[in-house]
Amino acid sequence: MNTHDTDNEDMSAEAVIARAVARRGEIFDEFRLLAQESPRTYDLISKTAGYMHHYTGSAGAEQKLSGTMRELIALCQLCAKGDDRFAANHVRRLWSHGVTNKVMVEAATAIAPIVGWSTIAHVTLAILTANDPKYPFGKIPEGGAPKMLTPFAELAIGRAKTTLTNESLLEAPEWKYIAALEPELAKRAAQWVDHCLLPNGAADELLGPGPRELIAIAALCARGEVEFAAQHIRRAYRYGLSKLQVLEAISCVLPMTGALTVQIGARALQLAESASA
């Protein structure tokens, strides 16, 4: 049997769209047109994204990351790419999980050292757009954005550090070099990056440094930065996160950055292993 066959499922555009809506709740007009023109293409997209982002009935029993964490990673990467039309829908999906705007901003802060802090502005723009009744994709929860956070698994993990290694940006060889040339530049950059990623960097964080590293690692792999990603993977391990949790975090950005990102992530995971052996 061809691996692309789908157990004799109806591959008409209408059936493919109906299955996608059952998984996700709605689909964008762009993908509705895609399904009409190439049903099998969209069916594979919908099934793959459904598994990675825990759409209804699509999650795998062995997966470790929660659907909420997956949505946070996806939101950040969409905003890093400037996909504001899609990002607002993910905000509404996060609201439906009971995620507050504050947590979304914290997640955006974690990706900012990798892709720039303009991404934080794209996340806040997505929140504003999601709050606009004229935005057509997804539903605003009754009562609007949640004021109280509904706990999810990653709020309680990745906080216990097992080494006392100083991981400030100023300890990186490149930034030591920069500091010798322009100390104030290095100081200010380090203050910013340490605030975003290190334990106690942000005094009021809800996301611990482990989950923030997952967001950063996925972004580094999307940029093709194998060596830097491996460094951050080793840091995530020191916070108690597992290899599978890291891989799943990277996979969350496949829909918007390509399967190559996951392949790059595999290289980074292997490099992290060899460096710690």
Image: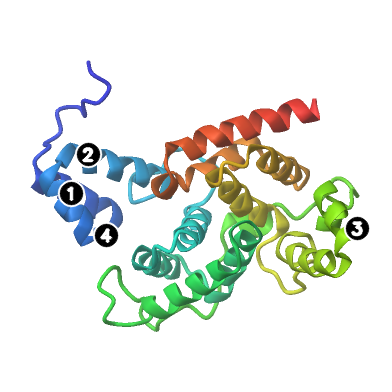
Q: Nearer the viewer, residue 63 or 4?
A: 4
Q: Is residue 17 left or right of residue 229?
A: left
- Residue 9 x/y as whole percent: 15, 33
For marks 3 and 1, give the one nearer the viewer: 3
Can residue 168 be seen in the rendering of this structure? no
Give the quarter of the figure containing the N terminus.
top left
Amino acid found under the numbered disc labelled 4: Gly
Give above or below for 89 relative to 222. below
For marks 1 and 4, give the one nearer the viewer: 1
For marks 3 and 2, give the one nearer the viewer: 3
- Residue 46 x/y as whole percent: 28, 45
Residue with the mark numbered 2: 41
Cα separation, mark 1 vs mark 4, equals 17 Å
Mark 3–mark 1 contact, CB under 8 Å? no
Circle 3 residues within 10 Å: few <14, some 14–19, many ≥20: few
Q: Nearer the viewer, residue 72 or 84?
A: 84
Q: Which mark is residue 34?
A: 1
Mark 1–mark 2 contact, CB under 8 Å? yes
The quadrant holding residue 226 is top right
Cα separation, mark 1 vs mark 2, equals 8 Å
Mark 1–mark 4 contact, CB under 8 Å? no
